[in-house]
Image (cartoon, rainbow, N blue to C red):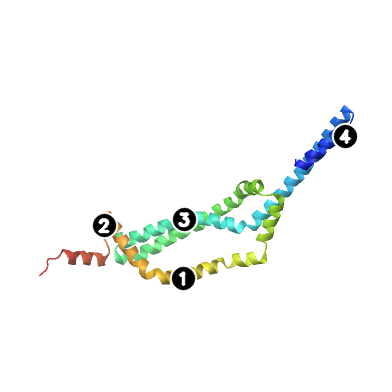
Amino acid sequence: MSISQRRYISALIISTTKPEMKIITVLALLLVAGVAQAQSTTAKKDLVARILVLQQAAIEQTAQALVERPALQLHQQAGLALQTRVAPEKREAAAKQVQADLKKYVEEVGPVVRQQAVKLAPSTIGTLLEEKFTEEELKQLIAIIESPVNRKYMQMGGEMQKALGEKLVAQTQAVVEPKVKALEQSIAKHLGLPTSPAAKASDASAKSPKK
């Protein structure tokens, strides 16, 4: 009940002379206030539900990222293992098998997790929106999400990431690649695993007696 509603009820109670009429007035006004509050809550729930529909793609992307995270980690580990523990002539076939397993995992798990994320959204994101935003703020948020400018910006997300990624790789590849190779060889050495042929040749040259 808002402060203005409380003041209005107090004024009506004071202006009522008969005790029994005061009780009836209080009950009636409390009922009206309760109905108004219920209507406001329903309106907020409807607005939140609309926001969740508008944001469903983002919710599913979050779920997909969670699914792909361990796959990316395993892919990196597999790449290191391929370079250090698999014979050169067998690497291509092993790499294809690893890729197939990773793809199968993402295709099988992804839909399940995305569906569950959408199912959980009302009780998680929806609850937070109801608690932290007023009805008017929810309306403003919907207006922002549905804005043509915002839609255009969101649609360009993939294009912008691709443009940045390609340029970033081109500009940093010469610096990053040697560091990655050195890191792989260092880790392999710590683990007692065979290093790359180039590293072996370098080690053999370093250990051979000078003539």
* Mark toward the start of the polypeptide (4 vs 3): 4
Helix, strand or loop at mark 3: helix
Q: CA distance from mark 2 to mark 1?
A: 32 Å
Q: Residues within 10 Å of mark 2 (few under 14, many from 20)?
A: few
Count the marks. 4
Q: Which mark is residue 189?
A: 2
State the residue in front, 142 or 118: 142
Helix, strand or loop at mark 1: helix
The kind of residue on which mark 2 rests is Lys
The kind of residue on which mark 4 rests is Ser
Which is closer to the viewer, label 3 or label 1? 1
* Mark toward the start of the polypeptide (4 vs 2): 4
Residue hosting label 3: 69
Q: CA distance from mark 3 to mark 2?
A: 27 Å
Q: Residue at x 33, y 66 (%)?
A: 178
Left or right? Give the position of 114 relative to 26.
Answer: left
Q: Which mark is residue 15?
A: 4
Q: CA distance from mark 4 to mark 2?
A: 90 Å
Q: Which mark is residue 206?
A: none
Helix, strand or loop at mark 4: helix
State the residue in front, 168 or 74: 168
Q: CA distance from mark 3 to mark 1?
A: 21 Å
Q: Which residue is the extreme one toward the right?
A: 18
